[in-house]
């Protein structure tokens, strides 16, 4: 299977992500009326669309969405090549699996951005074209806490805030991949270029050990 197995994981993430989004789009009403409670008021299915990046952040203007979609496309190509680069350089398998998760999540949301404006007619009102202006479908809502920030908190005191955004399968794959890499970065990246250390040692001058011995003496 060589490196193909890693791309198959990315493909699996894409298929699951798109399947869930299609089920939500065709079987749920958008917003609060269609909300489904899974675990009390804490975990819910809530159909909504996200025109921007994570946490609903937008770049602003019609060109902002186009720039974001184009950036996602370039990032997808870069991550796809990086996955192959890691495999070719015999990187830690854990790191490669994590990058495969991130790649699958990136492509999953990219499909929404490129095509959903046409397929589902969900491009924001006023967009110059529905292509590359589609909104990402989110559905998993973990309502951990919602309320007013105490007034004594600097800057954001007194503002209404809700913890945890609504997310989808693609977001989850990206999050899991990034978190695992962060917690294992020393082990993952230490194995990237171990041969360089060996080459460096083999290229030391022949009299280096003798010199060291003389210094110690």
Image (cartoon, grey):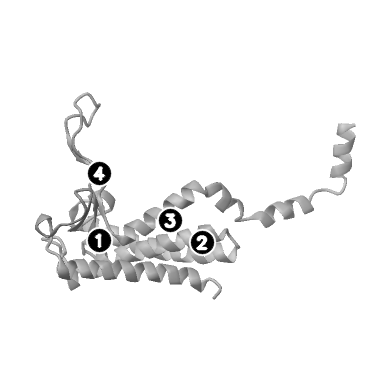
Q: CA distance from mark 1 to mark 4?
A: 33 Å
- What mark, if any, has residue 66 been given in the picture? 1
Q: Is residue 85 left or right of residue 200?
A: left
Q: Which residue is mark 3?
A: 177
Badge 3 vs badge 1, beta-carbon distance below 8 Å: no
Where in the figure is residue 216, as x and y percent of width and height? 86, 32
The outermost residue toward the left is 33
Q: Which residue is mark 4?
A: 144
Q: CA distance from mark 3 to mark 4?
A: 22 Å
Q: CA distance from mark 2 to mark 3?
A: 10 Å
Label located before the other in sequence (2 or 1): 1
Q: CA distance from mark 3 to mark 1?
A: 26 Å
Where in the figure is residue 197, as x and y percent of width and height? 70, 51
- What mark, if any, has residue 77 been given in the picture? none
Quadrant where the image shows the C terminus: top right
Label located before the other in sequence (3 or 1): 1
Q: CA distance from mark 2 to mark 1?
A: 30 Å
Instruction: Tell which tag, 4 or 2, sits nearer the viewer.
Output: 4
Secondary structure beneath dot 4 equals: loop
Where is 203 relative to 104, above or below? Answer: above
> How many discs mark residues in the rendered view?
4
The residue lying toward the viewer, choosing from 100 and 26, is 26
Where is 91 relative to 216, above or below? Answer: below
Label 3: few (<14), some or many (≥20) within 10 Å? many
Q: CA distance from mark 4 to mark 2?
A: 32 Å
| Residue depicted at x 54% and y 76% | 1
Label located before the other in sequence (1 or 4): 1
Where in the figure is residue 33, as x and y percent of width and height? 9, 58
Label located before the other in sequence (4 or 2): 2
Secondary structure beneath dot 1 equals: helix
């Amino acid at each position: 299977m060589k490196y193909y197995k890693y791309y198959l994981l990315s493909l699996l993430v894409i298929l699951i992500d798109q399947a869930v989004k299609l089920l939500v789009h065709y079987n749920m009403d958008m917003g609060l009326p269609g909300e489904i409670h899974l675990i009390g008021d804490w975990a819910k299915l809530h159909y909504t669309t996200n025109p921007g990046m994570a946490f609903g952040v937008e770049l602003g203007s019609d060109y902002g969405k186009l720039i974001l979609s184009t950036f996602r496309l370039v990032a997808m190509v870069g991550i796809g090549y990086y996955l192959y680069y890691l495999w070719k350089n015999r990187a830690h398998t854990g790191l490669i699996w994590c990058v495969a998760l991130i790649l699958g999540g990136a492509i999953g949301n990219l499909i929404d951005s490129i095509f959903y404006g046409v397929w589902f007619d969900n491009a924001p009102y006023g967009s110059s074209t529905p292509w590359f202006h589609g909104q990402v479908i989110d559905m998993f809502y973990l309502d951990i806490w919602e309320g007013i920030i105490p007034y004594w908190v600097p800057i954001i005191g007194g503002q209404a805030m809700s913890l945890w955004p609504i997310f989808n399968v693609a977001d989850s794959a990206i999050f899991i991949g990034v978190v695992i890499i962060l917690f294992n970065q020393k082990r993952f990246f230490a194995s990237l270029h171990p041969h360089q250390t060996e080459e460096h040692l083999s290229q030391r001058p022949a009299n280096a050990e003798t010199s060291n011995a003389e210094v110690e003496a």
